[in-house]
Amino acid sequence: MQFYKPTADFFVPDGAPADVAIARTTHLCISAHQDDIEIMAYHGVAECFGRKDRWFAGVVVTNGAGSPRAGIYGDYTDEEMQKVRVLEQRKAAYVGEYACQVQLAYSSSEVKDPKGTAVVEDLKNILVAANPEVVYLHNPADKHDTHVGTTMRAIAALRAVRDRVKPKKVYGCEVWRDLDWLLDEDKRVLPVSARSNIAAALVGVFDSQVSGGKRYDLATAGRRLAHATYHASHGTDQESALNFAMDLTPLIEDPSLAVTDYVLSLVDRLRADVARRVNSVA
Ligand SMILES: [Zn+2]
């Protein structure tokens, strides 16, 4: 596969030829940074792990520049740190038995640029080659602007190839803002209890991030446990870990639907629900 950036990285954990590796994809995640996939789309990894008929592929659009550096990484230059982050993402792909791992190596500002056509072209090529059944993106209500920018570029790519690539589901997932606020009928509930050992290892390989003082490993598991416990007030927990997702499929099926209008319609439903509940007991 050819990508716009000469520094782009294409890794196939089991050594299959590149075209074969990507063509077997059934579940595809497009994320902003190294480690986002493992936080937001473990559902897809778990669905495919150890199977011959389903394959998970990961795409990271940015280059990992400007990462925090602490401990053994304290003396690293930004370039050295970018190499560490690429290697850590490859480790996760190996542990998770991904079909392939693409790292497109764009700067954050390039990804956030609404005129960033190179990012969209790369994503279109990946989508056509992978032809996924399920796509995982950042949710557009995330509070990290690079996450939102990545999702906007991915939606543009999905819309551009929608005559050739028709995923059954497109999910907006949780990293920097969870989706507990969605009404239950608007939530897409993603069970992630399977293989907690692999789930833990996937976030754990990003040592440069966890050593940087942020316990993403514990927080990611904690969020999933909290969702499983607090999702329903009645009955016992069927799952010990859940992620929530926003259904983004309508945005691909209807390219005239503005992303802002769609997301704010979900916010409005929360607003109306809060008002109804308070008023019912006032
Ligand atoms: Zn991120």
Image (tube, rainbow, N blue to C red):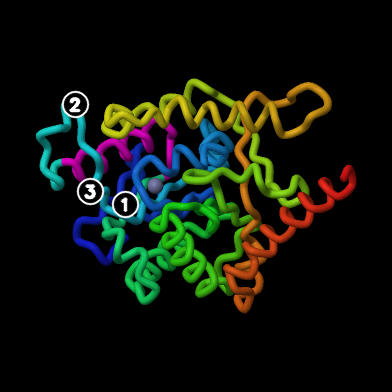
Q: Identify the amino acid type marked 2.
A: Gly
* Residue 61 image offset from top left, x and y in percent: 35, 56
* Residue 39 image offset from top left, x and y in percent: 47, 38
Residue corresponding to mark 3: 66
For the point 65% across and 66% down, the residue is 262
Disc 2 or 1, which lies upstream in sequence?
2
**Mark 3 neighbour density, 10 Å: few (under 14) some (14–19) many (20 or more):** few
* Residue 207 image offset from top left, x and y in percent: 29, 29
Q: Is residue 3 above or below residue 174?
A: below
Determine the residue located farthest toward the right in the rendered image: 280
- Check if mark 2's residue and mark 1's residue have beta carbons within 8 Å: no
Disc 1 or 3, which lies upstream in sequence?
3
- As measured in the structure, the alpha-carbon distance from the residue carrying label 3 to the one carrying label 2 is 16 Å
Q: Which residues are magenta?
A: 81-99
Residue corresponding to mark 1: 103
For the point 65% across and 70% down, the residue is 253
**Mark 1 neighbour density, 10 Å: few (under 14) some (14–19) many (20 or more):** many
Q: Nearer the viewer, residue 30 or 271?
A: 271
Q: Secondary structure at mark 3?
A: loop
